Amino acid sequence: MTQKFTPKAIIFDFTRTLYDPNLNKLEEGALDVLRVLHKKIPLAIYAKDKTGRTSELDELGIKGFFDAILVVKEKSGSDIKSLAEKMNVKPHEVLLIGDRVKAEIRAGKEAGCMTIWLKKGKFAGEEPESKGEQPDAIVSNLREVLDLIAL
């Protein structure tokens, strides 16, 4: 049995974790996962800067699931720390879920978060090259996240 995470908040990467930019729609299972988690725990979105990013969240009908939204030029541990602060939790109490070990997972580890790598799609072959890029768990489908969280 895999160890379960007991986060006090969850931060999701947006592109290729919750949203498929090639199909211009939510990733499979994203809505199910958000519906379950947002009733039980504070959620945040962590996205790279793109014009219209917050209106995209509105159009997809998911903006209301999130307690905090942070859009940045480059991802870093200090961003995660400020998001944790906005949600009134410590970084080590945060679970970060993303599809890139070189971006979200590294930023989450830098901040001291628990991390889950959604290993699928464009960056599935981007293997960790250091301890700072090593996720605490790996899933290949977003719905698997629910099995790893004790709420």
Image (tube, grey):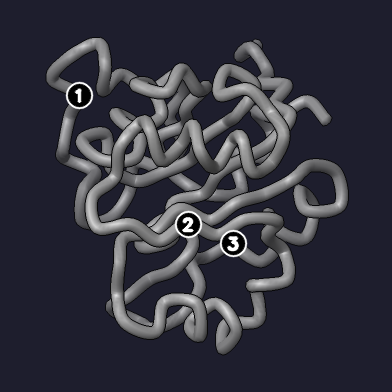
* Mark sitting earlier along the chain (3/2): 3
Residue 31: image location, x then y, percent: 66, 66
The quadrant where residue 145 appears: top right
Which residue is more in the foreground, 26 or 103? 103
Q: Is residue 47 above or below residue 115?
A: below
- Please say if the residues under marks 1 and 2 sit with CB atoms less than 8 Å apart: no
Determine the secondary structure under disc 1.
Answer: loop
Q: Is residue 83 above or below residue 51?
A: above
Q: Residues within 10 Å of mark 1 (few under 14, many from 20)?
A: some
Identified by mark 1, the residue type is Pro
Residue 65: image location, x then y, percent: 72, 64
Query: Residue 70, labelled with which disc?
Result: 2
Residue 75: image location, x then y, percent: 29, 45
Identified by mark 3, the residue type is Ala
Decide if residue 66 is on the left or right side of residue 116: right
Query: Residue 30, labelled with which disc?
Result: 3
Decide if residue 10 is on the left or right side of residue 121: right
Question: Which residue was labeled with disc 1?
Answer: 128
Q: Quadrant of the N terminus?
A: top right
Q: Residues within 10 Å of mark 3 (few under 14, many from 20)?
A: some
* Mark sitting earlier along the chain (1/2): 2
The quadrant where residue 79 appears: top left
* Mark sitting earlier along the chain (3/1): 3
Q: Is residue 90 above or below residue 52?
A: above
Q: CA distance from mark 1 to mark 2?
A: 25 Å
Determine the secondary structure under disc 2.
Answer: strand
Q: Residue at x 25, y 11 (%)?
A: 131
Q: Quadrant of the C terminus?
A: top right
The quadrant where residue 5 appears: top right
Decide if residue 15 is on the left or right side of residue 54: left
Number of the front mark, 1 or 2: 2
Identified by mark 2, the residue type is Leu
